[in-house]
Image (cartoon, rainbow, N blue to C red):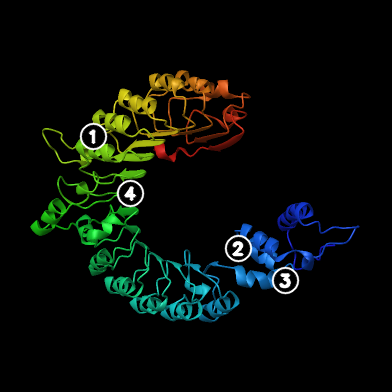
Amino acid sequence: MWSESHGEDFGIFRLFIQFLQFLLIDYCLVLQKRLVTMDALPEVLIWEILNRVKKTVDRNSLSLSCKRLHDLDKENRQFLRVGCGLDPADEALTSLCLRFPNLSRIEITYSGWMSKLGKQLDDHGLFILSSHCPSLTDLTLSYCTFITDVGLRHLTSCSNLSALKLNFTPRITGCGVFSIAVGCKNLTVLHLIRCLNVSSVEWLEYLGKLETLEDLSIRNCRAIGEGDLIKLGHSWRKLKRLQFEVDANYRYMKVYDRLAVDRWQKQWIPCDDMLELSLVNCIISPGKGLACVLGKCKNLQKVHLDMCVGVRDCDIISLARESHNLRSISLRVPSDFSLPLLANNTLRLTDESLKALAENCSHLESVRISFADGEFPSLSSFSLNGILVLVHMCPVRELALDHVYSFNDMGLEALCSASYLETLELVRCQEISDEGLQLVSQFPQLRYLRLSKCLGITDDGLKPLVDAYKLESLAVEDCPQISERGVHGAARTISFRQDLSWMY
């Protein structure tokens, strides 16, 4: 019989039973009513069990169930996530590093930390990691407010470090990041999120010369502007994923100098390896900065442009003509009051952009279109016809519309012939009524529906779906005229929430 100790939970016990059934077929351990013990299990099977348990709490419970599992877990554990529970921090981290000598991925997060929880990990803690974790390849530091450039310099001795992610580490400066760039020659992933004191960008130029970077994320780092990305130079060739987000509440306005503009325009920067591009709150200036990149990504699969002022039809058309493998596009368009007042309205996106995507991107599966919050909707919105052309010419499986006033009951009627559509999200689409919503039951492949902040629909719109079990999932959020009773039985899985504070 199984030996139970330390309160092994029911979920872990069921996992053992499932693997024992597999064991009976492949290894025939039960012969002539012999009792199975943990020592009888082959080591390869125990490794398989440990690899399939992902949650730390389950992993800890499993390792405490018997001595053999405890010993093997010490060798097998490669990921560790710690934070506020480290007290005293240095001693606790040292103990964990000694217990799990093969750690390759570590996440240290102090979200929600208060002084009464004990002292945070500081620079000496990173020295401990560099000394006791020779296999460390991926390190994430979140809300580690006591880490400085000195701590980052300790990490330069981690020769295998390939991924570093810093989230709100306010004492880190450009000097610390530069030391990582110089010391960690295998660095392929670098994320800087809300690193408010990283002002110098010499590290960008250094990484550009190395040409090793594949995944770069710079979000809400106030002193880093769009123009600085030119310093990546030839690393644009290797870059597979770029996230660049400017803090909307604090924009450090950098002026493009003439030399930088010339470099963007004259230097052809091939981005053939780029798969994902996400730009948030950026200024896209004609012939400058990121505008030079949009039309040079031949293998782009996913693009997200959120509140990027200055994006023109020609930018999206260039992107569509180059990125034939595009599978996902998300556009959040600024209101007209966010744009410069131009007589010819050249900065407005029109149906020409959607037409170019429909004609050139035959693999497009996910389309998300939204417009900025505000009292007035954007006057440069796409028309209903433009959206429908995109849905009908591409194999769109996911369609999400937010604040799109042009989408109405006629749009829902047209979607009845969308043979690929599986997921539909309608947020603040106030031209939709019950008459249009009732047509959802006729969509051939629809499985997931989300309605949020829609004023014109009531319980009557959902009646054709009740007890039909067509939908796998229905989410209704903050729609004032839909009740919890009205959604009952409209899908196999239902999520309902009603918070009407957004109306006042």
Q: Nearer the viewer, residue 82 or 203?
A: 203
Q: Position of residue 189 (x, y in %)?
A: 38, 62
In what element is the residue under mark 3? helix
Residue, disc 1: 349
> Viewed as shown, does residue 136 lie left or right of 183?
right
Residue, disc 3: 68
Q: Is residue 315 visible?
A: yes
> Viewed as shown, does residue 56 lie left or right of 209?
right
Mark 2 / mark 1, whichever is N-terminal: 2
Label 1 packing within 10 angstroms: few (<14), some (14-19), many (20+)? many
Q: Are marks 2 and 3 in contact (CB under 8 Å)?
A: no
Real-space Cα distance between discs 2 and 1? 47 Å
Q: Nearer the viewer, mark 2 or mark 3?
A: 3
Mark 2 / mark 3, whichever is N-terminal: 2
Q: Amino acid at mark 3?
A: Arg
Q: Nearer the viewer, mark 3 or mark 4?
A: 3
Instruction: Identify the residue at horizontal 35%, vertical 71% (top origin).
Output: 185
Q: Position of residue 87 (x, y in %)?
A: 55, 77
Real-space Cα distance between discs 4 and 1? 18 Å
- Which numbered marker is on residue 73? none
Label 2 packing within 10 angstroms: few (<14), some (14-19), many (20+)? few
Position of 105 relative to 387 (above/below): below
Extreme residue in the left direction: 258
Residue, disc 4: 278
Label 4 packing within 10 angstroms: few (<14), some (14-19), many (20+)? some
> Viewed as shown, does residue 40 lie left or right of 473?
right
